[in-house]
Image (cartoon, rainbow, N blue to C red):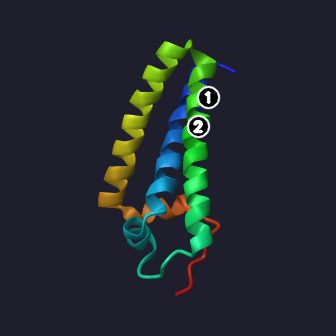
Amino acid sequence: MPDAILLLLAVLANIAGLGWLALAMDVHWEQAFGPVPASRGTVVLLRVLGVAGLVVSLLLCLAVDHASMASLVWFMTLAGAALTIAFTAAWKARWLALLVAWVRPAS
């Protein structure tokens, strides 16, 4: 697979991972879904998915380059993903709900 596609997948995995970690917090969950709280199982699942997304991103970066360059690229994509999630949470927090499309909070 071309390196550019692997790096794009790494960025997307970072964005998804940080988004899941953000949604695991009550304040961001409420921004995305309103006053309906997330279940304990959902919070645990979001944390596991968030960590898995970050690990997958690191592994994809390692598949493209040697360890020293891959770690630098990973940290840079992590910073970009953090800004993406932060701006999304501040501007259009409901968009974060797309990361948990399988969840249907009660009204």
How busy is the neighbourhood of tag 1: few (under 14 within 10 Å), some, or many (20 plus)?
Answer: some
Return the residue nearer the eye: 93 or 71: 71
Residue drawn at (50%, 35%), measured in percent from left and top? 11
Q: Is residue 63 left or right of residue 85?
A: right
Amino acid found under the numbered disc labelled 2: Val
Residue carrying label 2: 55
Measured from the top left, where is residue 94 in percent x and y?
42, 66
Disc 2 is placed on an element classified as helix
Return the residue nearer the eye: 81 or 4: 81
The answer to whether residue 68 is above or below residue 42 is above
Residue carrying label 1: 59
The answer to whether residue 100 is above or below residue 14 is below
Measured from the top left, where is residue 47 in percent x and y?
55, 56
Measured from the top left, where is residue 90 in percent x and y?
30, 59
Measured from the top left, where is residue 38 in percent x and y?
52, 74
How busy is the neighbourhood of tag 2: few (under 14 within 10 Å), some, or many (20 plus)?
Answer: some
Residue drawn at (48%, 14%), measured in percent from left and top? 68
Q: Is mark 1 in CB contact (under 8 Å) with mark 2?
A: yes
Which image quadrant: the N terminus? top right
Amino acid found under the numbered disc labelled 1: Leu
Residue drawn at (60%, 53%), measured in percent from left and top? 48
Q: Is residue 36 left or right of residue 51?
A: left
Would you identify the image quadrant in which residue 63 lies? Answer: top right
The answer to whether residue 89 is above or below residue 61 is below
